[in-house]
Image (tube, helix red, strand yellow):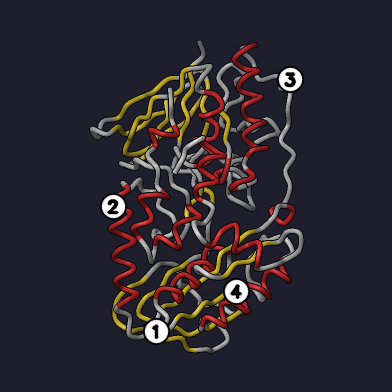
Amino acid sequence: MSSFIVIGAGWAGLAAVQKLEASTKITVLEVGSKDYVDINIANPRMAVEPQIAETAYQPLSKAIKRAELKHIKEIKEVSPGKVVVINAKGEEETLGADGIIIATGSKQSSPLMKDVTGKSKEERKAQFTAFRDAVKNSKAGVLVVGGGTTGVELAGEIRTDFSDVKCTLVSKSDLLLRGSAKRESMHKLALKQLETMGVNVVTGDYIEDLNEDYVGETKTFTTKKGREIVADVVVVCAGGTPNVPFAVADGTLDVKTKGLVVDGAMLCEKLSSDENKPIWAVGDCTMYGGRGMFIDPQVAALVASVSHFMKTGSTKNTPMKYNHKASESFPSLISVGRHGAAFSLPFANVRLGKMLKCKDLGVAFIYKKAFGIKV
């Protein structure tokens, strides 16, 4: 039986494991002490309601049925047939396998909105609780940097729970929700709802060199256009990039996206040209980025290639190729606090968005569809 190492127990890695673990030996590597499925769409709400982590963060043991989960401290090297790590004891260890699947996800400027250090569920709950307390006690207000889905949703959640706390959202782009289908219409719906909630939305402007979260004494931040914004809590919901936490040679990363270069079979030929010791990558760590609920086409191409390799011992002539589509071609769904939303199908509207996401963010549906987990 072939053996494989999957690096990363995020959404893409777990999706691959679920498809493959019944037919082969898999070891899943996860940095830190993370013991839960990290469903990132719930993070903006958990930032103000940490208790929902009990539902949103389901145990990894429910998603991994047969594969072995191994917690490590660091990934040192990935090369054909082996992964060099610093294990949980702090010792260097070399792990061997017939094939390697990299699914290390993405990283963001805000450790609140995206943890890549492997915090446990209790540590994440403590992190969210500390943020909630900071917002609750804020005197000057909260500054949310970034007008994408995360920034819009976080601003909405803050004003829902803390209507007396000033909240400003700054978007470098003139339109909110970059990458959204029907973006102009979705922008208008989101903007109207945010402003109705009392969020001060600034578009087409940005604050230079503001790249990390902040909680502390009141500061005045000046935008490029000279607007002054006062805040004592800052969350940077911008600047997401692929997470490749080990050294790679020139040409391994895409120049534009900084993600791992992969072919249609999700193979990283720059990491391994040996068809008998292949290395694949899937999800946010690749040049294509993750697709959230639409990760399935990437995973399908990966699984087809891995299955072909298990049968033939080679990655030549794999039966399926991934056909990349821009994020704008997929439906877009956002929540705006507990009572607002926007959904791009069949046209940009609020009503269907509220039905699909406002109550529980769609967490129950997602877990059932992806892993057969009932929450």
Helix, strand or loop under label 1: loop
The disc placed on residue 182 is none
Q: CA distance from mark 3 to mark 2?
A: 46 Å
Q: CA distance from mark 3 to mark 4?
A: 44 Å
Image coordinates of residue 213 in percent, x first then y, are 39, 68
For the question of whether residue 289 can be seen, the reply is no
Check if mark 3's residue and mark 4's residue have beta carbons within 8 Å. no
Q: Is residue 206 left or right of residue 342?
A: left
Return the disc, 1 or 2, that comes first in the chain's sequence.
2
Q: Which residue is mark 3?
A: 317
The disc placed on residue 123 is 2
Q: CA distance from mark 1 to mark 2?
A: 28 Å
Q: CA distance from mark 1 to mark 3?
A: 61 Å
Locate residue 302: give its quadrant.
top right
Q: Which residue is mark 4?
A: 172
Check if mark 1's residue and mark 3's residue have beta carbons within 8 Å. no
- Nearer the observer, disc 1 or disc 3? 1
Helix, strand or loop under label 3: loop
